[in-house]
């Protein structure tokens, strides 16, 4: 009963985490996550249904739910990792991986009809729960290599992104590595330790919670979306986002064009360019005094920039600060030229006035 209770609990927890996801964050993330949160509770339900099955037919039906999760969640997890690591998967790789996954899952659907995936199967009771004992057929030989392939590609993507991708959040990459490690443990290592229970449902729940933490910050890294919610786009302006701790969240291409040093900044870390960091911290401190947006001017690399700072919003939540920056060099030079011109006019007028005064005095 304890094993059955474990599977039932993980199923309920998966329903809760999926409900939270679709209630709060589904509009901000890639569709891979939406599909994953549909499959998480379905796969967890499969383990619970298997544990309470009374005959082979029901056990096979539940096992197919399990394979639905086992096949597609591995694929979707890999794509989610590549997406968060800001790495592009070639379309032909996507097509082949999708075809392979469908082939494996459709092969699993033949269980009970022929011996291609399972040569034989029967139910036994272990630790108070029903278990499907089976002899694998030839088509099952594709399942574990497919899982290993997806795990390997995911790990390679995480390592590459951690070394090369500045715009990929290091916190998110570390969390994704944890999800990958949990999956490897439950799929391979835990089964060698004990056959009393399947730890995969617990891994699904753990990963779903970690993904919720990632998704909670995911919209902050999508600078286009957060800016659209905070201010109307201006093609001549660049935008920089930082969180309340002063950590860099990202910037638009225009901001990187205006301040090339931003290209070397890393997401989730403090700004490392000393001039930009000192200015940003100063602007934030001034803004915090009255929370009123003022025009600020910054001299940087012989250029003059006009800066405005506001709160960064994720929906209705304040998540940090948004800094709008635009090149104001031409306008400031024009004003200086106009000021110099007026100054020259006044000086010339003063000289002429003095000359007229002297001529009058001489005439008298």
Image (cartoon, grey):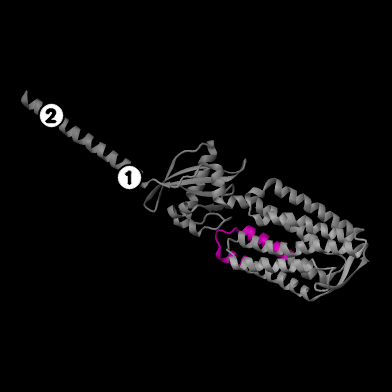
* Magenta stretch: helix, strand or loop mostly: helix
Disc 2 crowd, CA 10 A, few/some/many (<14, 14-19, 20+):
few
* Viewer-closest of 123 and 160: 123
Residue 324 falls within the magenta-colored stretch: no
Quarter of the image that includes the C terminus: top left
* Place of residue 324 in the rendered image (x, y in percent of width and height, measured from the top left): 48, 45
Q: Is residue 170 above or below residue 309?
A: below
* Viewer-closest of 102 and 359: 102
* Place of residue 210 in the rendered image (x, y in percent of width and height, measured from the top left): 71, 56
Highlighted magenta segment, given as a residue range: 157-182
Determine if residue 245 is in view: yes
Viewed as shown, does residue 323 lie left or right of 24?
A: left
* Place of residue 22 in the rendered image (x, y in percent of width and height, measured from the top left): 70, 48
* Place of residue 99 in the rendered image (x, y in percent of width and height, measured from the top left): 68, 67
Viewed as shown, does residue 272 lie left or right of 331?
A: right
Q: Which mark is residue 333?
A: 1
Q: Quadrant of residue 64?
A: bottom right
Q: Nearer the viewer, mark 2 or mark 1?
A: 1
Q: Residue at x 81, y 55 (%)?
A: 11
* Residue behind mark 2: 356
Q: Which mark is residue 119?
A: none
Q: Quadrant of residue 79?
A: bottom right
Determine if residue 311 is in view: no
- Secondary structure, mark 1, is helix
Viewed as shown, does residue 32 lie left or right of 298?
A: right
* Viewer-closest of 352 and 62: 62
Residue contact between numbered discs 2 and 1, judged by CB atoms under 8 Å: no
Q: Is residue 267 above or below residue 311?
A: below
């Amino acid at each position: 009963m304890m094993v059955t209770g474990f599977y039932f609990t993980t199923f309920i927890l998966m329903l809760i985490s999926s409900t939270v996801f679709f209630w709060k964050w589904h509009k901000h993330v890639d569709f891979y996550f939406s599909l994953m949160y549909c499959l998480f509770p379905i796969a967890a339900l499969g383990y619970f249904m298997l544990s309470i099955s009374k005959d082979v037919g029901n056990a096979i039906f539940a096992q197919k739910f399990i394979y639905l999760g086992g096949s597609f969640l591995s694929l979707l997890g890999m794509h989610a990792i590549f997406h968060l690591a800001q790495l592009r998967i070639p379309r032909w790789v996507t097509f082949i991986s999708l075809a392979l996954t469908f082939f494996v899952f459709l092969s699993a659907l033949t269980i009970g009809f022929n011996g291609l995936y399972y040569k034989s199967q029967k139910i036994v009771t272990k630790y108070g729960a029903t278990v499907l004992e089976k002899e694998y057929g030839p088509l099952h030989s594709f399942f574990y290599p497919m899982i290993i392939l997806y795990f390997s590609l995911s790990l390679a993507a995480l390592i590459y992104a951690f070394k090369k991708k500045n715009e990929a959040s290091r916190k998110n990459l570390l969390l994704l590595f944890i999800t990958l490690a949990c999956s490897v443990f439950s799929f391979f290592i835990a089964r060698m330790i004990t056959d009393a229970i399947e730890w995969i449902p617990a891994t699904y729940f753990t990963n779903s919670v970690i993904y919720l933490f990632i998704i909670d910050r995911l919209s902050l890294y999508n600078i286009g979306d957060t800016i659209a919610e905070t201010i109307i786009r201006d093609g001549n302006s660049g935008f920089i986002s930082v969180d309340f701790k002063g950590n860099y969240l990202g910037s638009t291409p225009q901001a990187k064009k205006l301040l090339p040093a931003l290209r070397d900044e890393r997401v989730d870390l403090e700004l490392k360019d000393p001039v930009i960091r000192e200015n940003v911290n100063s602007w934030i401190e001034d803004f915090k005094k009255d929370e009123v947006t003022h025009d600020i001017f910054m001299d940087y690399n012989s250029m003059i920039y006009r800066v405005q700072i506001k709160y960064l919003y994720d929906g209705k939540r304040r998540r940090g600060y948004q800094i709008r920056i635009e090149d104001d060099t031409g306008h400031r030079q024009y004003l200086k030229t106009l000021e110099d011109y007026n100054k020259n006019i006044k000086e010339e007028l003063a000289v002429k006035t003095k000359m007229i005064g002297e001529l009058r005095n001489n005439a008298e």
